[in-house]
Each structure stands twice: as structure tokens, then as C-alpha cells.
Image (cartoon, rainbow, N blue to C red):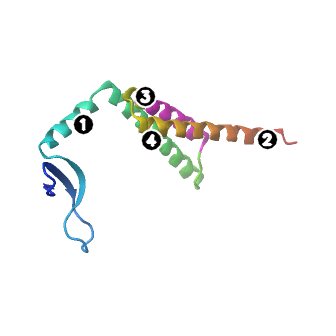
Amino acid sequence: MGWNLGFTGHHVVTAPQRSSSRKGNLPLVIFPQDSAPGWFAEVISRAKSPLAFLGFLGQIVFFLRFLVQWIASEKRGASMIPLSFWYISIAGSFLLLLYGILDRDPVIIVGQCAGTLIYFRNLHLIKRSRSAVESKP
């Protein structure tokens, strides 16, 4: 569903309102009116590239960490973060960082660099904590 907001040459894709207190639809995407089919075609085209494959692979690996955490928590009967969560986080983060670098996307690069540092720091803290426990008589 789309309509013209009155912005010259722009088209808006909208989502239906959930609340009956407001009339109309919420705008989701605003783009030049004649470019909507071209925009979607470009997105689909870019999704077929080897670079996009790398990005999707990184997203899948990154998602797997949540799956591993959920399964471990269900087995334990309480929320927990297994050690493998951090290793999978690093693997997914590196793949997404590589994607961001190759795509020259500063948002992905900064976000994944920060996350990767945190994941390595957590592994260091876990190792230090385990060493302290093991060294106690």
C-alpha cells in the first residue's frame, strides 16, 4: 500500500495502524516515486552477490549463538551463557566485520569491532575466573 505525502516526486510505503486512536497508516519507507520497483530490484540483485552471501553467513553464525544459549539454558532449567556462545560470537562478528570492510560500511565496521573486543574481553574474564578457582587449595 502506498500513497503520495505531497512531497514532490516521493512515494511512501506504509504499515496499517494497530491503534484505533490514530487515523491513517505509518510511513515505513520514503523513496523517489518512480524508483520503487528499481529499488526493490536492486536489493534482490545485491542479495545474490558473493559479498551478500558472506554477510548472510555472518548473520547465520551470529544467530547460532542465541540458539546455543537457548538450548543450554533449557537443559539447565535456568538462563546461562555457555562458553561456546562467546566463541560463536567472535566467529560471527569476524564474518560480519569482513563483510563490512569489503562493503565499505562504516556502521557495520564500528559495530562489529566494538562487539568483538567485548567478546574477547569476556573470554579473558572467564579464563581468569576459572584460573583463580582452580588455583585455590
Q: Marks 4 and 1, Cα distance to the nearest angstrom?
A: 22 Å
The earlier-in-sequence mark between 3 and 4 is: 4
Height in image: 38 above or below 21? above
Precedes in sequence: disc 4 or disc 2: 4
Query: SS of the residue at dot 2?
Result: helix
Work out whether residue 84 or residue 36 is closer to the camera in this orientation and state it. Answer: 36
Residue at image mark 4:
63
Q: What SS does tag 3 mark?
A: helix
Of residues 17 and 53, which is closer to you in this image?
Answer: 17
Query: 34 left or right of 68?
Result: left
Which part of the image, by quadrant, shows the N terminus? bottom left
User: Which residue lies at the image location 41% right of the left edge and 32% below the top edge?
Assistant: 100
Q: Mark 2 points at which residue?
A: 132
Which of 114/127 is in front? 114
Please report whichever mark, 3 or 2, sits nearer to the chain's N-terminal start: 3
Task: Report which residue position mark 3 lands on.
Answer: 101
CA gap, disc 4 to disc 2? Answer: 32 Å
In this rendering, is residue 12 above or below 127? Answer: below
Task: Say if mark 1 contacts mark 2, CB within 8 Å.
Answer: no
Looking at the rendered structure, the secondary structure element under dot 4 is helix
Tell me if 102 is positioned left or right of 119 in this view.
left
